[in-house]
């Protein structure tokens, strides 16, 4: 499989197949980041398209000094997400009619131990619900670290904050998430 | 330094990742041994840290890659066919149900207006001549109902106004001469008979005469 930097160079030479490969390779990452941040599939789709549109227009500005292509791509995605969040903050409803998983409390089924593993998709939905309740700053830190798998240095580049701030946000984000999931009866029995 | 719950929270991620200095790690462990709340929190955070990386990623919606390529380079391949599961899930969406409801309501109104009976639909139902005849008949029926409704209103209005006039006319002389004397049953009966006769003549005069041209010329 060709490295991303090579695909970028081919794209800049006008090779459409290289661009298609880049899109196919990274759509899942971009969509997941957008969905985990917005908790809305339609918004995540629209934002994913915006990300790749911006990428397409600014591909020539990517340089290896910017770090890995994925880090640069994540940075573009994150900036668009924050812009979208600020734009829609006033109009945002707390409860969306298209949102899967209402904010209603999730209680464990009777006779079911809290530490029993829920099905994978249930857990994903429950984590998503909890993620939606923590502040955007902490939410993006946890998503980038624990869901997207970036290391502290990469997250520092994406967020443009010191590493200490990155660690602090990840820590506080996890603690808030932990408390919310405990209230929902999910997680370790403690 | 006394290690507090605040210290435990602030340094929890570093503790779980084994990044604390030996002295601080010892203080943290001593605190966790004594504090059930911090112990529970630490266990929950550790659970999250190990589970989240293995959470199932969301499935990319069908056609998103195609739409992205169309919007950017415009060189998308033929859109991949939707699987039957994706098709079924799209049918269960609220938008589809709303659209289906709107279409059903529109068809109902259309059939009513054209006089088509949904239970007896046949090929003849869609013959343009039959559709015209049914629509014409429905229009005439609706018009006739409207005319009757307005006429009914007119009758009621005229009766009420004339009865009000009748009840407002001065009292007969017998009542004025002896106001304190209670009305005799016979004079009361006479009054009722008068009112009934007047009412009958009012109704007869308010009804449209047979063969009258229509109500639009008369007006209310």
Image: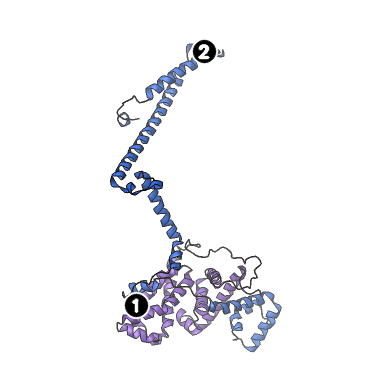
The reply to whether residue A152 is visible in this rendering is yes
Report the chain shown in blue.
B
Query: Depth check: B42 or B99 in front?
Result: B99
Separation of marks 2 and 1 at Cα, in angstroms: 102 Å
Q: What SS does tag 1 mark?
A: helix
Tag shown at residue A7: none
- Image location (x, y in percent) of residue B180: 56, 14
Q: Report whether B207 appears left or right of A176.
A: left
Tag shown at residue A56: 1
Q: Report whether A92 appears left or right of B81.
A: right
- Image location (x, y in percent) of residue A174: 57, 76
Query: Depth check: A159 or A189 in front?
Result: A189
Q: Give the position of the N terminus of chain A as an image quadrant.
A: bottom left
- Residue at the extreme front: B123
- Residue at the extreme bottom: B22
Tag shown at residue B187: 2
Q: Report whether A114 appears left or right of A20.
A: right
- Which residue is at 36% across, 87% downward? A6
Query: Depth check: A10 or B43 in front?
Result: A10
| Label 1 Cα crowd, 10 Å radius (few <14 / some 14-19 / many 20+) | some
| Label 2 Cα crowd, 10 Å radius (few <14 / some 14-19 / many 20+) | few
Report the chain shown in purple.
A
Q: Chain ID for label 2?
A: B
Location of residue A17 by image quarter: bottom left
Location of residue B51 by image quarter: bottom right
Q: Chain ID for label 1?
A: A
Q: What SS does tag 2 mark?
A: helix
Q: Is residue A117 above or below residue B177?
A: below
Location of residue B156 by image quarter: top left
Query: Depth check: A134 or B68 in front?
Result: B68
């Amino acid at each position: 499989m060709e490295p991303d930097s090579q695909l970028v160079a081919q794209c800049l030479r006008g090779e459409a197949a290289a661009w298609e490969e880049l899109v196919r390779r990274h759509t899942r990452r971009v969509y997941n980041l957008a969905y985990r941040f917005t908790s809305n599939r339609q918004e995540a789709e629209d934002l994913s398209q915006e990300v790749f549109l911006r990428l397409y227009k600014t591909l020539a500005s990517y340089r290896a000094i910017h770090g890995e292509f994925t880090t640069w791509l994540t940075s573009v995605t994150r900036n668009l997400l924050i812009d979208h969040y600020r734009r829609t903050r006033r109009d945002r409803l707390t409860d969306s009619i298209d949102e899967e998983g209402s904010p209603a409390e999730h209680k464990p089924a009777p006779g079911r131990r809290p530490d029993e593993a829920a099905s994978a998709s249930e857990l994903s939905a429950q984590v998503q619900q909890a993620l939606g309740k923590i502040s955007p700053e902490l939410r993006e830190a946890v998503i980038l670290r624990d869901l997207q798998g970036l290391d502290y240095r990469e997250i520092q580049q994406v967020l443009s904050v010191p590493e200490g701030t990155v660690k602090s946000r990840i820590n506080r984000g996890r603690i808030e998430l932990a408390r919310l999931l405990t209230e929902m009866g999910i997680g370790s029995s403690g | 330094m006394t290690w507090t719950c605040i210290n435990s929270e602030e340094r929890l991620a570093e503790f779980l990742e084994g990044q604390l200095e030996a002295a601080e790690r010892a203080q943290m462990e001593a605190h966790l041994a004594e504090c059930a709340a911090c112990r529970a929190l630490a266990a929950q955070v550790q659970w999250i840290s190990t589970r989240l990386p293995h959470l199932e990623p969301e499935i990319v919606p069908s056609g998103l890659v195609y739409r992205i390529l169309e919007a950017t380079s415009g060189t998308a391949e033929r859109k991949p066919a939707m699987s039957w599961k994706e098709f079924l899930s799209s049918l269960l969406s609220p938008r589809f149900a709303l659209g289906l409801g709107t279409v059903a309501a529109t068809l109902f109104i259309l059939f009513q207006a054209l006089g088509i009976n949904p239970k007896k639909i046949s090929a003849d139902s869609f013959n343009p001549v039959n559709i015209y005849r049914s629509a014409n008949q429905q229009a005439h029926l609706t018009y006739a109902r409207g005319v009757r409704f307005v006429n009914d209103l007119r009758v009621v209005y005229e009766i009420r106004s004339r009865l009000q006039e009748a009840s407002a006319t001065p009292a007969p002389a017998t009542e004025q001469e002896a106001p304190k004397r209670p009305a005799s049953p016979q004079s009361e009966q006479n009054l009722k008979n008068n009112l009934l006769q007047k009412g009958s003549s009012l109704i007869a005069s308010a009804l449209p005469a047979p063969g009258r041209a229509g109500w639009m010329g008369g007006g209310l």
